[in-house]
Image: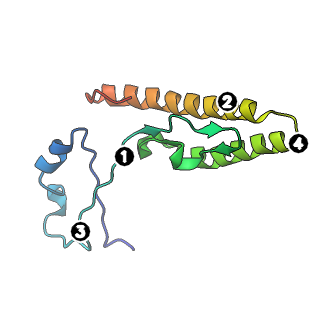
Amino acid sequence: MGRARYQWMTLAFVPEQGRRRGGPPQEFAGLVPEGPARAADVSWRLCPRASGPGWFVAGDAGALLDPASSHGVLRALLSGWTAGSLAAGVAGRVLEESEAAGMYGRWLREGAERDMAELSARYAELGAHGFG
C-alpha cells in the first residue's frame, strides 16, 4: 500500500459497454498492473420468501443490491438483529411463528424495495434505464 499504488473501477450499465472501453484511463498508461482485471456481478436479488415458521433468511441471502446502495453491511447486521429479536419474541411466547415470519418478510422486502427505487432513480438520472 502507499503512494505508488492506484486503483480504477468502472460501472458498465450494459455488459458489452464495459468491454468496449479498452482498459484503464490514459493517466495510467505505462503503469504495470499488480494483478489481473476482475469483474463482479452486482445483480439485484430479493429472496421471494425470506421467512417462515421457524426460519429467517438474513444478510445477502435475503436481499442483495449493488454496492452503490451503501446499505449492504447495515442490511446484513440489521437483518440478523431483526431475525434474532423476532425469534426471541417467539421463544418468549410474545409472537406466533407465523406472525414473526410475516413481520420479518415485510420488513426485509420494504427496505430493499425502498433502496431499489432510490438506485433506479439515481441510475435514470445518469441515463441508465431498466434497473429496479
Q: Residues within 10 Å of mark 2 (few under 14, many from 20)?
A: some
Depth-wise, is mark 3 or mark 4 nearer the camera?
A: 4
Alpha carbon distance from label 3 to label 4:
53 Å
Alpha carbon distance from label 1 to label 4:
39 Å
What colour-coding does the image apply?
rainbow
Q: Amino acid at mark 1?
A: Val
Disc 3: which residue: 36
Q: Secondary structure at mark 4?
A: loop
Disc 2: which residue: 102
Q: Amino acid at mark 4?
A: Gly
Q: Residues within 10 Å of mark 1 (few under 14, many from 20)?
A: few
Mark 3 or mark 2, which has the lower sequence index? Answer: 3
Mark 2 or mark 1, which has the lower sequence index? Answer: 1
Disc 4: which residue: 92
Alpha carbon distance from label 3 to label 2:
45 Å
Q: Quadrant of residue 75?
A: top right
Q: Position of residue 128 (x, y in %)?
A: 27, 30
Task: Find out whether the residues at labels 3 and 4 contact each other: C-beta distance under 8 Å.
Answer: no
